[in-house]
Amino acid sequence: MSEQQEQTGLRERKKQRTRQALSDVAIALFLEHGFDKVSVADIAAAAEVSKPTLFRYFPAKEDLVLHRIADHQGEAARVVRGREAGQSPLAALRAHFHARLDAHDPVTGFSDHPAVRALHDLLYGTPSLLARALSFTVRDEKELADALREAGDGAGDELVARLAAAQIVTLHHRLALANWRTLTSGCTPAEALERAHADAERAFDLLGAGLGSHYG
């Protein structure tokens, strides 16, 4: 590794640490006072940075929370491209979602860890956060559509791929929201997990009924 590459790597790691620290401060304030009652100026003061510095790292207040799930962007496309030989895109996505449920991955909406539950309560209970999260799906849909277009029958049909990607990404978000609601309804984690798996099976069955001829 050259000295220049090493310096670039150090700068990038420092930026990531700063982003994480700013996000941690903001989320602590949001959980204590409520998202809408905390201003950008409050966050900057608590983090001991200027507002322009804060906006350099996070263009929108909502991004301070959504930073926690940003690493999942493009995940569906990666699953499709990395599927086993002979496995269909929908089968790979179904298996991946079930595996993430068993791992209690926060992205599925199913996690009984107190800190994750609190973050989900904040996300799903704040309309502006939920709207911002849904806006992230534009990139996810584009990447997934590209991956689907490369796979199976209808690979060259851009419209079919984009329609399929929109349905798959929406399915993931709706299942995550349903799982959060199940956990907050008073179900035990074991009961909630069983229901989450059943809901996922039903959802993917419905999806397969419409898309199976192309990606099933």
Image (tube, rainbow, N blue to C red):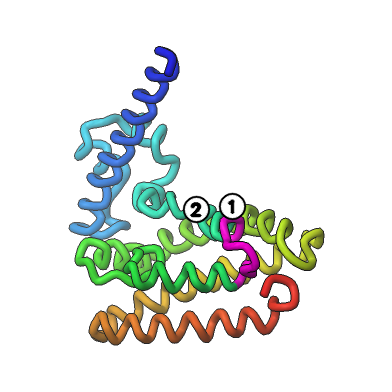
Secondary structure under tag 2 reads: loop
| Cβ atoms under marks 1 and 2 closer than 8 Å | yes
Q: Is residue 132 magenta?
A: no
Identity of the residue drawn at 21% across and 52% down? 28
Q: Amino acid at mark 2?
A: Gln
Residue 182 position (above or below residue 117): below
Quadrant showing the N terminus = top left
Label 2 Cα neighbours within 10 Å, binned few <14 / some 14-19 / many ≥20: some
Label 1 Cα neighbours within 10 Å, binned few <14 / some 14-19 / many ≥20: few
User: Residue 139 bears which disc, if any?
Assistant: 1
Residue 171 position (above or below residue 158): below
Where, by quadrant of the figure, is residue 192 drawn?
bottom left
Residue 150 position (above or below residue 42): below
Where, by quadrant of the figure, is residue 48 drawn?
top left
Secondary structure under tag 1 reads: helix
Identity of the residue drawn at 40% across and 40% down? 58
Identity of the residue drawn at 44% across and 73% down? 98
Q: Amino acid at mark 1?
A: Arg
In the depicted view, which residue is nearer to us: 102 or 7?
A: 102
Q: Is residue 136 rendered to the left or right of residue 101? A: right
In the depicted view, which residue is nearer to us: 210 or 92?
A: 92
Q: Position of residue 18 (x, y in %)?
A: 30, 34
Can residue 188 be seen here? yes
Q: Position of residue 78 (x, y in %)?
A: 55, 54
Q: Position of residue 19 (x, y in %)?
A: 33, 38
In the depicted view, which residue is nearer to us: 30 or 151?
A: 151
Region of the chain picked out in magenta, as a range: 80-90
User: Residue 73 bears which disc, if any?
Assistant: 2
